[in-house]
Amino acid sequence: MSYSNNYETSYTSYGGGGGGGGGFIPGDGSQNSPSGGPKDYTRDTVRPVTIKQINDAQSVGEEFKIDGAQVAQLTFVGQIRNVSSQTTNLTYKLDDGTGSMEAKHWNDKDTADEPSPGREKLVEGAYCRVWGKLKSFNDRKHVVATIIRPVEDKNEISYHLLEATYVHLHFTRGPIGEGSGGGGGSNGAAQQQDSGGHGGAALAGHNSVAKRVYEYLRTTPQTNEGLHQQDIASNLKIDAAEVSAAGDQLLADGLIYTTVDDSTWAILETD
Amino acid sequence: MDHPQTPRVLAKHLEAFQYKLVRVLGRVVQLRGETAVVDAGGSINLILNRDCHLALNHAVEIIGKVDQGLNVKVQAATDFGPNIDFEASNAVVEATHRHKEIFYDDD
């Protein structure tokens, strides 16, 4: 499949560009330095999205969430509707059928003499793929693009939309092969995904009561003291002794831990 | 929004999108001057405008309006060349209707 190769190649060049540049991504350094802490690389992912998903993204301070999961870098494919050349950047208006979004490619004085390859193909009507970061200015979202390159093989458009769908379903319904992960709201999907991945495999050997207790602990809003086994028993309408036995099993396997006393439990997060 | 949403459709969806703006990816099977026929999970008649340059057997992406007779009146056409995997692109259309939340708003 030529288009998947195509994708791999560009992905590599993306990594090379970002890594080698050091501060090549505008705003990246300055945003993290005030906190003083080390950068949280676990969230540094590239997420394929549709433009509608970008328009629907919820802002949380400086960051954005899609399907309840924080987005760092994102990538999308669209048709160029307008190109406007500013002194400091090139702004592309992109349309993928689900909405419009502006992608700004800031001029980098180090590379100004050698425009990125394929730049001349980024004209109105052409399809392109963008990698970048979502920003908001005066309540208007735009993407600060690290890389914009023309889509040579149009199958990449299908590929991208299917990949975006797949990742959306991953966040809203859990990883493939974990059917029970469904039903969770979009809020907290990020945590669900982590614990779900862990619990899902480890829970395999447990009986249905233990699984329900675990699910209940995982999905019920609670303080960091967790939940008392009496509450769990009455809400799930399961005999208290059974819940207690299920809790012992989950404790023994390190899936939950006791908090204020032996009968108050919380999920042991693995991240 | 200056560029409205254009739901992706196949031939079988036309009825549900009458008088709406849609996006069709199909293979050009007939050219008849002012009209053309594309195959997009079934035949779709196109009413062309002057700016269309369709090539026989090439894939073409159409943005257009579905009329009363379920023809698509073309507003814009983009040539996608001869090497489009229609199995994948038709799967995309199915996915956009099944998981509409990330593609299109409700009317």
Image (cartoon, rainbow, N blue to C red):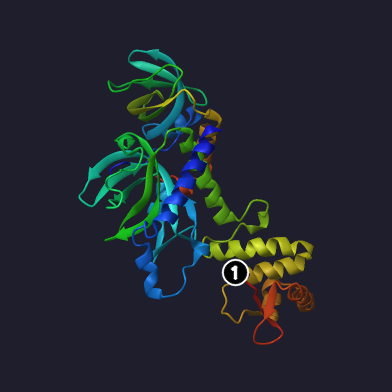
The chain containing the residue under callout 1 comes to: A
Q: Nearer the viewer, residue A18 or B21?
A: A18
**Residue A62 visible in this rendered orientation of the protein:** no
**Residue A198 visible in this rendered orientation of the protein:** yes
Q: Nearer the viewer, residue A105 or A48?
A: A105
User: At 40% across and 64% down in the image, what residue appears?
Assistant: A63
For the residue carrying disc 1, how many other residues have a C-alpha within 10 Å: few (<14), some (14-19), or many (20+)?
A: few
The picture places residue A59, in percent across and down from the top left corner, at: 39, 63
Q: How many marks?
A: 1
Tell me: A136 left or right of B106: left
Q: Quadrant of the C terminus of chain B?
A: top left
Q: Which residue is mark 1?
A: A271
The picture places residue A264, in percent across and down from the top left corner, at: 67, 82
Residue furthest toward the top? B32
Residue A206: quadrant of the picture? bottom right
Residue A220: quadrant of the picture? bottom right
Residue furthest toward the bottom? A261
Name above or below for residue A208 compared with residue B41: below
The picture places residue A171, in percent across and down from the top left corner, at: 55, 56
The picture places residue B39, in percent across and down from the top left corner, at: 48, 22
Q: Look at label 1 and name its amino acid.
A: Asp
User: At 59% across and 55% down in the image, what residue appears?
Assistant: A173
User: At 48% across and 37% down in the image, what residue appears?
Assistant: A156
Tell me: A214 left or right of A113: right
Name above or below for residue A259 compared with residue A30: below
User: Circle 1 — which element?
Assistant: loop
